[in-house]
Amino acid sequence: MGVGADNKSVSTSAKFTLQQLEEEKEEVELDKMTPGSAEAMRLAKADPQSTESRELWGRRLEFVLASIGYAVGLGNVWRFPYLCYRSGGGAFLIPYLIMLFLCGIPLLFMEFTVGQYTRLGPVHALAKICPLFKGVGLATVVISYVLCTYYNVLMTWALYYLLHSFSPSLPWQSCNNTWNAVGNCSTGFPGNATHLQSASQQFFDHKVLEVTTGIEHAGGIRWELFGLLVLAWAIVYLCIFKGVKSTGKVVYFTATFPYFILFALLINNVQLPGAKDGILFFLMPNWSKLLEVQVWVNAAAQIFNSIGISFGSMISMASYNKFNNNILRDTFIVCLANSATSIVAGFVIFSAIGYMAHIHNLPVDDIATDGPGLVFVVYPEVFSTMPFSQLWAPLFFIMLLCLGLDSQFAMVEVAVTFIMDGFGKKILPIFKRKELIILAVCSFGFLLGIPHITRGGIYVFQLMDHYTAVVSLMFLAFFEVLAITLIFGVRRLSIMVEKMLGKKPNLFFRVCWQFLSPMLVLGILISSIFQYTPARYGKSYTYPFWAEVVGWFISLVSIIWIPLGALHELWTTEGSMLQRLKKSITPTVDLESVSEKPSAESIVLFTAA
């Protein structure tokens, strides 16, 4: 009793002294930690929405490889080379590089900054940056998740080709198979004979897809593809089920292996007859193309699609960084690696196309194509005539799997990060383990992918790709740039950079954020609207009206969250309409409580970059 009575009589000043001692003890413990961990811990304590137990990348290299792996995807192989050739050859590199430095690099640096500083995924990070446009963050999650549901179908096709490439003879080599329409099958490229199809085209259409005549004829499920889709999602789950800890280890292989195959193919292809003609066709500059607005729009759109700006993945991955990681250096590494890979892929693809043109005595223009047709029709045909075709075919499709899986990891991670940031404390008691939450995310993505592996699935795939990756993306990019650089402001963004890296971004980045990038994004958006064309499959199939309506609905599934988020914020904010509007554009992100003194290491790294 005496002890209890004495405890109750402890003075307020004594309690304050004890509290001070506890805080000083915590500060000493923080000082003993590495600078990045200490800063991250201080930020987590200052920010109630951030969690102290948030995962971190095991090493900085893992974050860089994961970012490169996400940026360098199938589009670098099948989209950039064809776009370069169609938009002026070597002359296209001028607008491409200008857009890279005025849009790509500044906006990726911006996304890395937001993710790393807030340590939150795109939904909650953008809600703190600009509450009025909190719907932009949710829209990026939706578009990434919709994209990953059909992107994994490409992995399914690649697995199908990989398994068949181990056959005694490549099955797309000849017209003597049960799936071939012998009357109009050609063992080479048919050229101007429009009634003929190549053996590889018939393998893709009649064996892999068993394609119907249109989207209105679903035709039932392709059970072989169904099983491979299960396998593709199982691979994705096993690579990410432990979060960034497991993903960080997997990317050491998936992000580097494609480069070995690309350079091996390049060395092999340039020695083939006709390769020189294909490369010259790829690079021959047509300077008059620089006067066409569409060429500049193509360059900017390729930068956005390839780097992955406005998909939310880069913000999500940067949120697992240490607080003072040098994101400026990482930005340059990721962007330059992505662009260099696109150019190397152009040499690989067009050297092979030049070889095929030489073999079949056709113009290169008759063989050049883009999209799935390039990697699942043209390139398999190339392998069928190459020396050591049984070696190159499986290596090529393993490369495609690696390129696709890296992008798939990042897109699924966006959805997982959103769920854990927003609902982690509520749903973890139900699911018990984070691994089960990731399993649920992957399982739902698998279910949404089933329509793509029906016999009419290729039409669904093309429709989804057109209205997700083409129509929706630029709307999201514009509102993201508007929210961060114009409403949140370049001054606040610069403070974030300074607190993390010890130095404000230079004049180049501030000018790009304030003026150049927003104007370019707006210009691309306006041009995309005026030059809109309906979705098509191949050269002849046009979609029925109801399918176009479905396509616009797919676009609205992501875009609609932007106005809904703004209306919700204005509705739930108290005061007059003017007061509500003012509050809704006032950021809630903490720019004061983070330690003002960055580590010496971060200052050195910033200067080196």
Image (tube, grey):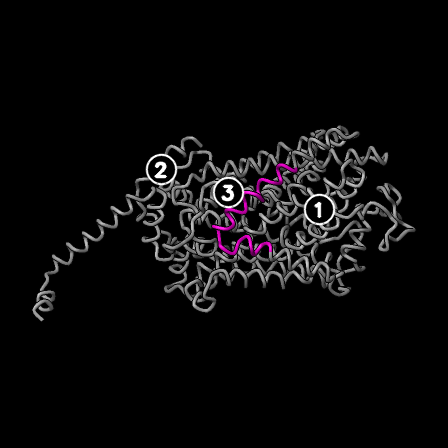
Which residue is under mark 2? 502
Disc 2 to disc 1, C-alpha distance: 44 Å
Q: Position of residue 215 (x, y in %)?
A: 75, 61
- Report the quarter where the N terminus lies: bottom left
Which secondary structure type mostly characterizes the magenta part of the structure?
A: helix
Which residue type carries mark 2? Gly
Secondary structure, mark 1, is: loop
Query: Does residue 247 belong to the magenta stretch?
Result: yes
- Hey, what amino acid is under mark 1? Gly
* Numbered disc 2: secondary structure: loop
Which residue corresponds to the image point at 12% horizontal and 60% vertical from the top-left?
Answer: 12
Give left or right: position of 304 versus 569: right
Residue stretch in magenta: 235-261
Residue 50 picture location, percent across and down: 38, 55
With 107 as the anchor, is 214 left or right in this view? right
Earlier-in-chain disc, 3 versus 1: 3
Residue 437 appears in the figure: yes
580 relative position to 2: left or right: right
Mark drawn on residue 108: 3
Q: Is residue 180 left or right of residue 584?
A: right
Whether residue 548 is visible? no
As drawn, 289 above or below 110: above
Residue designated by label 1: 371
